[in-house]
Image (cartoon, grey):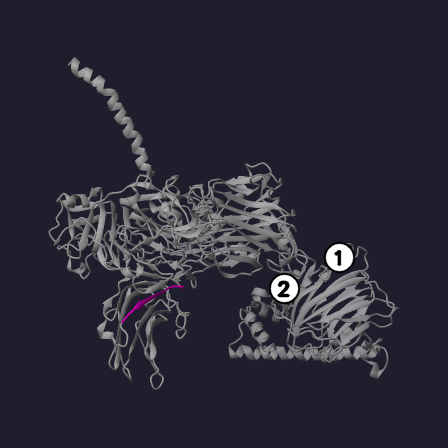
Amino acid sequence: MSDFTALLLLLLPVLCSIISTCSATSPGSRRCEDSLATPLPYSSFTSSSVYNRGCGAGYAKLNRKQGAGGWSPLDTDRYQWLQVDLGSRKQVVAIATQGRYISSDWTSKYRLLYSDTQKNWRPYLQDGNIWTFEGNMNSEGVVRHELQHAILARYIRFIPLEWSREGRTGVRLELYGCSYWADVISFDGHGVISYRFRSKKMKIVKDVISLKFRTTAGEGVLLHGEGQQGDYISVELHRARLKLSINLGSNQYGSIQGHTSVTSGSLLDDDHWHSVVIERYRRNVNFTLDQHTQQFRTNGEFDHLDLDYEISFGGLPVSAKPASGGRENFVGCMEGITYNGDNITNLVRRKKVDTSSFRNLTFSCAESNSFPVFFNSTSFLQLPGQSDSDTLSVSLSFRTWNPNGLLVFTALADGWVEVGLTEGKVTVYMNVTQKKNTRIDISSGSGLNDGQWHSVHLNAVENYAMLTVDGDEASTIRTAIPIQIQTGGTYYFGGYFLHTNSRSPQRSFQGCMQMIHIDDHLADLRAVEQGQIGTFENVSLDMCAIIDRCVPNHCEHGGRCSQTWDTFSCNCSGTGYTGATCHTSMYQQSCEEYKYQGKSSGSYWIDPDGSGSIAPFRVNCDMAEGKIWTTLKNNLSPQTSVTSADQEGKAVLQITYNLTDEQVLLVTGSAEYCEQYVAYTCRMSRLLNTPGDVPFTWWVGRANERHSYWGGSGPGIQKCSCGIEHNCTDPKHYCNCDADLRAWKEDAGLLVYKDHLPVSQVVVGDTSRAGSEAKLTVGPLRCQGDRNYWNAASFSSPASSLHFPSFRGETSTDISFYFKTSSTHGVFLENIGTTDFLHIELRGGSVVIFSFDVGSGRVELTVRSPVPLNDNQWHRVEAEKNVKEAVLQLNGQYREVRHIPPQGHTKLEFYSELYVGASSGQRGFLGCMRALKINGMTFDLEERAKLTPGVNPGCQGHCSSYGMHCKNGGKCVEQYNGYSCDCSLTAYDGPFCTDDVGGYFETGTLVRYDFLQEAGPFALREVKSQSGVSVPSEANLTQEELVFSFSTSSSPSILVYISSRTQDYLAVVLRHNGTLQIRYSLGGLAEPYTIDVDHRNMANGQPHSVNLTRNLREIRVQLDHYPVSTYTMPEASDTHFNLIKSIFLGKVFETGQIDPILIERYNTPGFVGCLSRVQFNSIAPLKAALRSGMAAPVSTHGILVPSNCGASPLTISPMASASDPWHIEAAGAVFPFSEDKASGVGVDRNSAIIGGIISMVIFTVLCIMVFVIRHMFRHKGSYHTNEAKGAESADCADAAIIVNDPAFTETIDESKKEWFI
């Protein structure tokens, strides 16, 4: 025992050393950082050429000085290469380069190719592009690049692209990585691996499946498993794309469909290795192909994958159901197959898995016989063929994205033959010039520019030609040739040879070709590569570098991707988004934002999360009130009868909003307040079963939560509105319906707890008893306010800033915000990474700069505003960077767009916080910023500002930016989260003081506005009118403004009359001929000063506007859109309008001395028609009469019905005074004026008395006629009196009838229509 103990003590240091060595090497191998090139022998390095023996390929090792200190090729051009044989497949993760030791030779830019077989080379791709690495700028510096994704290959080729200007190409390099090994299995299309489960049925909730594959076939099943209950999982190639199909279960009735299908990748038949990983947990699936992951949830409601017996790899098992048939087995190679922890390839090698279907099971991957040729826009390939032959035969396979391009051209002894692509079709042009010009055109196929391999075979023999596409003999095009052809013997492929043959149009082919046959012989392209036959220019041999730029699809939000060889484009139509990648929303984020753009109420599309994943949706925006309401309607009609109860006596009513839950949450989440009206009308149908019992009825709101309170109450309170207000029908209950009465009752009110809204379901539980009835109303969801739109912060110190976690880099990044400042400079925001940065700033008071670096150098966009931006008004900045372009936009109109170079990081990578304001010692922003949104997410500036010195939450001063939206003299009023328009001193209403206030005047209707004797003048003091005329503080006015609109078909009449406590007055009347007359009586003159606007019949039923202003003796009149006319009162006239007493509209009913001409000629029967927007200085008498909520000394006599029929003046173009045939100069106003001059000067009092008697007689006759007509209508049955209901408030019996006639409004509407005939 002691010897054994001694032995252990002796071996202990050795064991510790082994353990420590293992622990030391293990992490190193996990890091995969081994030097791969340095340990290799000289012979592992080969090259296209060497400059001399000292510059051999074997000397190209990092930091080595042997030989001439590195590799240099004989020729300095892009056809040179350095190849490294790693001995076996390795995982390469990084590369480092140097120039040639102590020389002027280095490589400044290069590319990498890799292969397992020295054939079919593949370029290293990054971010969807053939990547160009930045190399060296001197001979000794080391430049290292970490590969975005590892290369798995045995052979690596280094391709110089640019080199030293002082010397030539030179390089020393090192490759970093580690060993890689995996079991490889070759599939011939017959063999299938069947992995049998340990039990007959597997009920699996979690799956992890991985494998790598390599193939030249575009079709084939990689794995398949299914169960007898209909579950299945399948991965297969279809058109060279990988399709995952999975079904966790569908029910027999078809109401639950579990089938889910997802497609990924493209061009997977390129004979290169591709890795696949499928991770599933219940319904959540990660589908990863070559580092690109798609995340999705399976359809249906089931979580388990039920498989029977086995899962197969390489094809369908023999036991597969017939419905699964018809699909091809896989042809190619697989390695690293694992299924839920079991290494399938290892089990195959150990013969633990059934492989009986294989004819010859091999654990190696056979080399492909294909030799592709890669053409760009400046490439061509020349190959020889038979000359002077009467048979022409040429065939090839091609793949491309371009719809046009020349495939083959060959000259004949007399003429030429051209095979090309035209709009995705293969076209053949044969031009035979012997004897006469004969041109033969044939075409076949369609959509051949889809990136797939397509074959073309042209055969011309004797007197006919045949064109076959994709081997479809049945669709072969055959045409006659009038004479026999003779071949020229030289064939050009690729199109770029104008300098060689000028007879062919330049339609360069961009794409790949292979399997080129001339005269039915396969062209030896390897001999071409070695320079033995043919020639080429700018062609990449034994490589197809086609890239699918639409996979992954950079077109966001459902945009449709299309591509050419060089780029892709997005069709965003119908998506609701715009921009190069359909990233930017076309719509505003809320009704609030629409309002502050000057929009009125209506239906709008909104997109609260902007560029986020939630689609825009339509809502109703109500801006008529001071607050902006967003309304979401539902499918439930008002007073819906509750029927069809289930077995438990419950009736379930589903309420839908045509929106997703996420869309509704966006509205409620940002709203200040939400409400939803609910009403339960009942007869013997109890509602909440109060007090205290289990409620019969409840409703379901957000998050599927159940609630048992009703409108007018709140959460946790099982009461209705009447229970809160203590006015229920039965005091013992807290709801009217809970009294269980036979009479109809109702419980109604508003649900206002927005975290519970909207109502998505109502369950009614007491309608099954005999005599029980119920009706349900669930109104629309209404929300007001947008906290995100007004989320603001004020920066008061240039050193202050807000810090936020760095936002996640995406392929597209957008930033938007509003700002206002009085400073000329300042940084808005900044984020910094290791190599990346993003920066937006204000410079010079009028320039906004957006700069960033995505790994390919600094990109800077600048937008200059024509007006200063430091004007303390709100301005909006929108910046976007995507894979195609960068955009900077200012105030929605000034913008710069810059193309993004393809080299660079697709995703921004930051390590620092996001700084809003000052950063890195720079001068920060001073002013206000609000509505900061990045990638659809709003940043809470207010909350962060509460915790940050030098920054305050919120921002005042919105009127400086938005005050112009308050029209017609409306006053902008500041609010914490916006502004409102005060229309109280205008003749208008509405959110922007743009809604006309008008009324329809019946015969005898008048409106009277009185000024109190002691307060009258003061009511007009210190008020500024629309034209900017200030009312003086004295009691007597020396200036005034009168504005109104009217429409009428009758005359004469008084439109407006302003009286005083003296004999002063102002009157605007329509004379008998419909022309307008203005009468001013201010004293000092024997007669009123009168202005007549002759030859304009204003009583034509059309709307007309009048604007009358006076300043001392100068009077300015504007009618409709005609030029302003100016008149001057005589020097003898007084300039003071003394002691204003009343304003009359439509008719005058006044005591005291009144101009008898007004009374006799214009006051009877009174104005009939419409008056709108009447305003005298700051007084709006008609608005005061029509708005019951306004406390004003106004009275109405007769019937006045709200109407804006006089509100829209004719849109006649302005006319110069000189060319206006109706215009009357100021000299044309005759003074003194009397309409009775023909019969003498002055007014005869006797005539006035006689006229009064005649008027009374006429009035009596009219009253008799009204009585007779009414009597006749009664007998016709069209007259129904309800006098008793309105008699007390009406001035006469007729008025009472009109007030109570429900058809009265319609009658007015009809009469209004007649005026515009």
Secondary structure type for disc 1: loop
Looking at this view, name the residue that lies furthest to the top.
2
Residue 158 on image: x %, y %? 36, 49
Q: Nearer the viewer, residue 858 or 952?
A: 858
First in sequence: mark 2 or mark 1? 2
- Position of 1159 relative to 203 (above/below): below
- The C terminus is located in which quarter? bottom right
Residue 536 visible in the picture: yes
Secondary structure type for disc 2: loop
Mark number, residue 1020: 1
- The N terminus is located in which quarter? top left
The residue labelled by disc 2 is 997
Find the distance from the CA under tag 2 to the CA under tag 1. Answer: 21 Å
Range of magenta residues = 377-385
- Position of 41 relative to 1195 (above/below): above
Residue 871 on image: x %, y %? 66, 51
Residue 468 visible in the picture: no
